[in-house]
Image (spheres, rainbow, N blue to C red):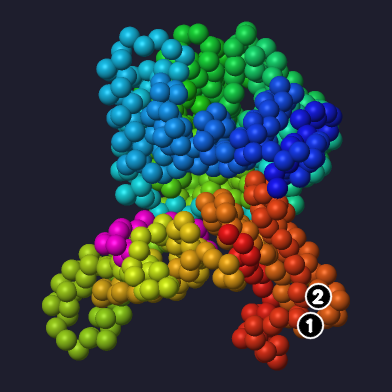
């Protein structure tokens, strides 16, 4: 039975506001039954009240989404749900809501085709995006005299079309970046971004909006904690637990870092004063920093923003961004040098080779003194900010034409604040990715030229082995053959067939492949219905995670070993049977891992958790039971409590991602339902320590 919602809400404590959004459907003020239309209107009123009282976009979006689910014909609920997805996370989900708006009334918004295209663009469906962008462009040209506020200019839509075509090109030719989440000791379920590291890569400083250890126990208007600057130190080869850098740096309000000197002794900070200025703090000792002080007016301008900074290893050049007058448009990148007295001199714009009429931001000058990384909304990008690289030609005193770092480091959304390590082998930046914990996470990127030996070296090793075996043969002939073989390293072909488990029929799905350790994404090619091919060129045996997703079916996510590329053609075949989502069907979440004897996830778990969340989001009519299980080691009561806590952790993660809490139930069975004998570890107890989900309603 549908009930009326409590509309008079006192928003006094926003740290529990998300639970309000989840529980709002259970709150009743009157006992009168109401229609789906009335329920949707009540939810819309609640969303509007949220926005009047706060800027909690996520919670307002959830309310509009619930309203659209209650009454799919409510055009406002659908439009606002799509619009708020574009303003928050999971932006690609906006397209389906805008599509509903178009079906209900294609004249509801002049720019509805553009909005649909933007949703598909941000959801990596570039062909569909191009189709809708072109439809909007045709409408725009036909109605060129339209002057409404919901008009997107021809210049902007042409830019989006350009970005989509670039994205198709980059995605078809990805670069082998290894992109690894730095882990749960650094990242949180909230915003973590703008990492900077010192020269020896032992200190990382970054900005976060986590609640734990925040200087201010309250939250800002958007229902997230205020920005604070945190620090992590290397412990062996892993980053240690991040902690607040201290109240000398952090205030009760927003504080964010911008850059770190190579020696790690000067931290550059953004302060929201004078429309945005750069401040600097000196490290007095390991845990003691001086009060931040503003840079001189050679850097900070009067009334304009300075938003990023990077200094070279000699501390003689400072690169930064500013929107001051005299630039090429938006934010531009400038450089200042130190004079003989050690003061920063008048700044110089880097010029049109680097700067565009769009925003150009986040410069990072590498330790070689000539390689500049930066982010731009212009140039040949995929959408939002893309990361580019340029080198300074000292002979001609010019910067080379910037090069887009390509996919997958760049995406259709913002990719910004990339910093490289001293040896040039790695870099760090923040992104929203498949294995992230929630919002932006910090990732370590290994640049392609440093991943492994190149194919020529691999071939030489194989050729040398072959030559040794055939040493009695004609040496000159063998050398010729081996030289030819050096150029004939053949990638391994992984052929995947996706089929409906109920009838064996091949069917299309979203199929992905990424290496388990290095997180290298391999693009797939659709050969025919349900048949996909991946070309893998690794110099050693490598374990990959193969995934498949399709609306109305259980997702698949399992590991596949792939041999090293060699001189002979190799083919690996896999068949994926997809089970339909129906009451009673269940699956083991084999890639969810917990810290030992705890209910906290390890970094490797989030890829699986996010696929589970997406399956529930795309199939809103199903409910599931999440069950925790253990082996029989230890006391039965303890095992049952631990299994319940672990099931609760999965459910809480899903609820925090926006899944209605009434659709997910946690049950801990302890050691009551083993899959195998507990007499053996590998084939018994290990299998019994698991989390499952079972569809309980549709």
Position of residue 537 relative to residue 221, above or below, is below
Give the class, few, some or many, for how many residues have Cα within 10 Å of label 1's Cα (few <14, many ≥20): few
Q: How many marks?
A: 2
x and y percent of residue 319 in the render? 53, 25
Residue 147 seen: yes
**Residue drawn at x 67%, y 49% as measured from the top left:** 660
Position of residue 201 relative to residue 269, above or below, is below
Q: 25 and 640: which one is in front?
A: 25
Could you tell me which secondary element the residue under label 1 belongs to?
loop
For the residues labelled 1 and 2, say whether their Cβ atoms are less than 8 Å apart: yes
Give the class, few, some or many, for how many residues have Cα within 10 Å of label 2's Cα (few <14, many ≥20): many
Give the residue pinned by disc 1. 633
Viewed as shown, does residue 77 lie left or right of 401? right
Foreground tag (1 vs 2) = 2
527 in magenta: yes
Determine which of the numbered discs, if any, sits on residue 383 in the image: none
**Residue drawn at x 76%, y 74% as measured from the top left:** 669
x and y percent of residue 208 in the render? 70, 38
Q: 22 and 318: which one is in front?
A: 22
Position of residue 698 relative to residue 502, above or below, is above
Residue 565 seen: no
x and y percent of residue 626 in the render? 68, 65
**Residue drawn at x 56%, y 70% as measured from the top left:** 585
Q: Give the mark nearest the N terminus, 1 or 2.
A: 1
Give the residue pinned by disc 2. 639
Magenta-colored span: 516-533
Residue 46, image quadrant: top right
Viewed as shown, does residue 470 lie left or right of 692? left
């Amino acid at each position: 039975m549908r009930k009326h919602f409590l509309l008079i809400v006192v928003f006094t404590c926003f740290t529990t506001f998300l639970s309000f959004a989840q529980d709002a459907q259970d709150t009743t003020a009157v006992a009168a039954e109401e229609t789906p239309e009335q329920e949707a209107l009540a939810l819309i009123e609640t969303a509007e009240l949220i926005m009047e009282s706060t800027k909690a976009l996520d919670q307002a979006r959830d309310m509009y989404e619930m309203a659209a689910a209650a009454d799919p014909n409510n055009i406002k609920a659908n439009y606002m749900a799509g619009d708020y997805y574009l303003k928050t996370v999971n932006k690609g989900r906006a397209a389906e809501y805008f599509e509903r708006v178009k079906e209900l009334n294609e004249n509801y918004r002049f720019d509805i085709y553009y909005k649909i295209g933007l949703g598909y663009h941000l959801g990596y469906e570039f062909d569909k995006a191009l189709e809708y962008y072109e439809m909007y462009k045709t409408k725009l040209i036909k109605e060129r005299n339209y002057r409404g506020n919901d008009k997107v200019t021809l210049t902007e839509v042409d830019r989006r079309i350009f970005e989509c075509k670039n994205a198709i090109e980059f995605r078809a030719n990805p670069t082998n970046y290894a992109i690894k989440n730095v882990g749960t000791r650094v990242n949180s379920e909230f915003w973590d971004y703008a990492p900077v590291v010192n020269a020896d890569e032992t200190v990382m400083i970054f900005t976060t909006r986590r609640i734990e250890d925040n200087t201010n126990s309250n939250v800002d208007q958007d229902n997230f904690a205020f920005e604070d600057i945190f620090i992590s130190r290397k412990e062996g080869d892993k980053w240690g637990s991040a902690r607040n850098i201290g109240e000398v740096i952090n205030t009760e309000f927003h504080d964010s870092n911008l850059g770190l000197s190579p020696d790690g002794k000067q931290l550059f900070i953004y302060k929201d004063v004078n429309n945005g200025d750069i401040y600097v703090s000196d490290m007095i000792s390991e845990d003691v920093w001086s009060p931040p002080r503003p840079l001189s007016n050679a850097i900070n301008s009067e009334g304009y923003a300075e938003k990023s900074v990077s200094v070279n290893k000699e501390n003689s050049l400072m690169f930064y961004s500013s929107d001051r007058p005299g630039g090429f448009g938006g934010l531009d990148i400038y450089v200042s040098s130190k004079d003989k007295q050690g003061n920063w001199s008048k700044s110089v714009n880097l010029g049109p080779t680097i700067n565009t009429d769009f925003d150009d931001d986040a410069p990072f000058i590498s330790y070689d003194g000539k390689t500049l990384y930066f982010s731009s909304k212009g140039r040949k990008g995929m959408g939002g900010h893309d990361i580019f690289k340029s080198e300074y030609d000292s002979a001609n005193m010019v910067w080379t034409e910037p090069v887009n770092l390509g996919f997958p480091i760049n995406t259709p959304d913002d990719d910004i604040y990339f910093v490289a390590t001293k040896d040039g082998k790695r870099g760090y930046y923040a992104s929203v990715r498949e294995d992230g914990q929630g919002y932006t996470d910090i990732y370590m990127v290994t640049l392609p030229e440093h991943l492994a030996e190149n194919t020529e070296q691999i071939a030489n090793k194989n050729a040398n082995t072959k030559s040794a075996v055939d040493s009695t043969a004609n040496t000159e002939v063998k050398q010729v053959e081996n030289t030819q073989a050096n150029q004939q390293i053949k990638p391994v072909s992984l052929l995947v067939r996706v089929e409906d488990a109920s009838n064996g029929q091949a069917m299309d799905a979203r199929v992905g492949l990424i290496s388990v350790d290095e997180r290298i994404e391999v693009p797939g090619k659709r050969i025919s219905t349900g048949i996909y091919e991946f070309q893998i060129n690794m110099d050693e045996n490598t374990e990959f995670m193969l995934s498949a997703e399709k609306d109305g079916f259980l997702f698949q996510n399992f590991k596949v070993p792939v041999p090293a590329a060699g001189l002979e053609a190799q083919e690996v075949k896999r068949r994926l049977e997809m089970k339909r989502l129906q009451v009673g069907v269940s699956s083991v979440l084999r890639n969810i891992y917990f810290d030992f004897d705890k209910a906290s996830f390890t970094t490797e778990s989030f890829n699986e958790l996010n696929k589970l969340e997406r399956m529930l989001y795309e199939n809103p009519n199903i409910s599931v039971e999440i069950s925790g299980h253990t082996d029989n080691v230890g006391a039965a009561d303890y095992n049952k409590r631990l299994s319940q806590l672990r099931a609760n952790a999965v459910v809480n993660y899903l609820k925090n991602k926006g899944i209605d809490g009434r659709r997910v139930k946690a049950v801990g069975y302890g050691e009551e339902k083993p899959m195998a004998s507990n007499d053996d570890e590998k084939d018994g107890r290990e299998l019994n320590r698991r989390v499952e989900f079972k569809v309980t309603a549709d």
